[in-house]
Image (tube, rainbow, N blue to C red):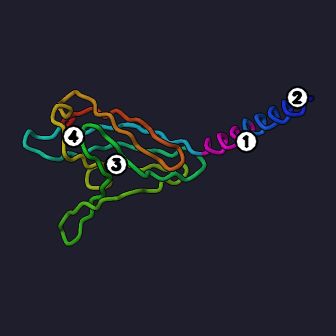
């Protein structure tokens, strides 16, 4: 029995799998998510919530969607402040699209991260909070947010 045809077929199958995975990897390179200037506000001792800010950039050529935010030190959600008739309210944004060559600016009175159920041992001045931003195409991006007073 000649085993050469079986070996050749297995080799060709592996070659095709490797080749196809490299093409899908190249496609994913069209999304490039970057973060900058992230920080979280030091909450007062009696506070149950605090906010975080920063910039998320999509410098790639494809749209990507922020689909989840995870943090071991607190529950965290993306919110947007909306003012109607002089009253501010926060709206939970479960996911948000970030267009190619654009950025999502998280700042006071706009989009921001809302931290609740705070683990007080993490939210101390000078400490860094670990945050994972989950994107539909580019996966998880880890960000370290320094805890600081809002006026710094």
* Category of crowding for the residue at label 4, using alpha-carbon neighbours closer than 10 angstroms: few (below 14), some (14–19), many (at least 20): many
Q: Which residue is mark 2?
A: 3
In primary-sequence order, the first of circles 3 and 1 is 1
In magenta stretch: residue 27: yes
Q: CA distance from mark 2 to mark 1?
A: 26 Å
Toward the right, the furthest residue is 2
Q: Which residue is mark 4?
A: 41
User: Which is closer to the viewer, label 1 or label 4?
Assistant: 1
Q: CA distance from mark 3 to mark 1?
A: 38 Å
Q: Which residue is mark 1?
A: 20
Q: CA distance from mark 3 to mark 4?
A: 13 Å
Query: What element does badge 2 sit on?
Result: loop
Query: What element does badge 3 sit on?
Result: strand
Taking depth in this image into account, of 13 and 22 the one nearest to the observer is 13
Query: What element does badge 4 sit on?
Result: strand
Q: Which residue is mark 3?
A: 106
In primary-sequence order, the first of circles 1 and 4 is 1
Going by the image, does 135 lie left or right of 25? Answer: left
Q: CA distance from mark 1 to mark 4?
A: 46 Å
Query: For the point 18% across and 67% down, which residue is it?
Result: 87
Instruction: Tell me the quarter of the image containing the C terminus.
Output: top left
Residue range corresponding to the magenta coloring: 19-30
Taking depth in this image into account, of 88 and 8 the one nearest to the observer is 8
Residue 71, position as x, y percentages in the image: 31, 40
Residue 69, position as x, y percentages in the image: 36, 46
In primary-sequence order, the first of circles 2 and 1 is 2
Query: For the point 53% across and 43% down, which residue is it?
Result: 138
Q: Cβ–Cβ below 8 Å for labels 2 and 3?
A: no
Taking depth in this image into account, of 100 and 73 the one nearest to the observer is 73
């Amino acid at each position: 029995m000649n085993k050469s045809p079986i070996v050749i077929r297995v080799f060709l199958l592996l070659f095709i799998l490797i080749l196809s995975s490299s093409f899908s990897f190249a496609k994913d390179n069209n999304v490039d998510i970057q973060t900058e200037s992230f920080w979280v506000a030091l909450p007062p001792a009696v506070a149950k919530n605090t906010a975080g800010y920063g910039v998320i950039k999509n410098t790639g050529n494809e749209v990507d969607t922020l689909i989840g935010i995870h943090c071991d030190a607190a529950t965290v959600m993306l919110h947007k402040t909306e003012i109607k008739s002089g009253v501010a309210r926060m709206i939970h944004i479960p996911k948000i699209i970030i267009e190619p060559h654009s950025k999502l600016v998280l700042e006071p009175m706009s989009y921001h991260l809302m931290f609740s159920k705070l683990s007080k041992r993490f939210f101390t001045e000078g400490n860094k909070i670990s945050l994972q931003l989950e994107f539909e195409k580019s996966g998880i991006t880890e960000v370290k947010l320094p805890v600081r007073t809002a006026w710094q």
